[in-house]
Amino acid sequence: MSEAVTTPAEGGGEEANPLSSAIDVLNHELSVLPLSGKLATTEQPMDRIGPSYSLANFTLTNYTFWLIPAVLFVAIFFVWARTQAKVALEKGSLVPRGVLNVAEAGVSLVRDSICTDVMGPEGRKYFPFVGTMFFFVLFNNLLGNIVPALPGTGTVGTTFMWALIVFFTYNGIGIKKNGLGRYMKSFIPSGTPGWLKPFMFVLEIISHFLRPITLGVRLYANMYAGHIMLGVFTIFCALAIESFREGISANIIVLPLSFLMSVILRAFELFVAVLQAYIFAILTAVYISGALHASEH
């Protein structure tokens, strides 16, 4: 994917330790490696990192690039499902098949098991918002498990933006339905002693402002950490193969164990990809439900 990083060893011109170099490459590629340009060296590590965060020198990184196909896949998936639904209706068939079956299962999960169950009958009208977010996160998470793709949700820019959208959305819903005064009063639980009310109000305000942070960090950390672990064991496999070629028999044990861990982690990542999309969606539904019923608190 990228050329190896080599740096002069201390006191000479020899190549750096291969494990250290491999970890440097992994760390850089899982952070902000632009799609063009040379890999940063350890002597000038900010050569390519700096421009990635500069609005004046915007460039696509590995993570931001893979957001594009993920969004396209979501659109294609539902257009395909809609086409199959029209064909099925024309044929008089009421049994969903193929992509349509998967799409209906996903829609039913978000609409009924998340929106309606958490928010009540009123939650159905918020399904388009929660559903869009769920499928966006899900497709990004799943796409990240296809080599050489990376999940767009593995960067804080994506997860925190969604978390902020959720934050402003549920607070806007709460203010619109209850009015600003009643909504702010809901931050103080009923039955709280008068002397304790100011303290509880401050705590509730802090907890509300922490929600987008915890929501964004949870998704980002799970997706990013998973790919770090996969990368580490892949490096172990590559180094074991290289050492085995050089006659180091001990790597007969390291290689299969590293490969086994890579397979297990890949399966676990698929599970986490679905689980994190579900958690993100259900927490959003919980926050909206709390805003809708703020006056009842």
Image (cartoon, rainbow, N blue to C red):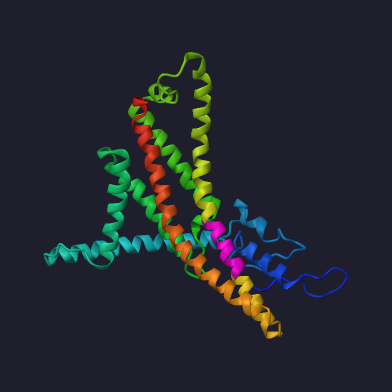
Residue at x-position 66% and y-position 58%:
49
Q: Which quadrant would the C terminus be assigned to in this image? A: top left
The stretch in magenta equals 223-233
Residue at x-position 64% and y-position 67%:
37
Percent of width and height locating residue 177: 33, 29
Percent of width and height locating residue 154: 53, 56
Residue extending furthest left? 92
In this rendering, does residue 6 appear at all? yes
Q: Which quadrant would the N terminus be assigned to in this image? A: bottom right
Prevalent SS, magenta region: helix
Q: Is residue 269 left or right of residue 19?
A: left
In this rendering, does residue 39 appear at all? no
Residue at x-position 58% and y-position 59%:
59
Could you say which is closer to the camera, residue 294 or residue 243? 243
Could you say which is closer to the camera, residue 154 or residue 59? 154
Name which quarter of the figure residue 285 lies in: top left
Q: Is residue 2 above or below residue 56?
A: below
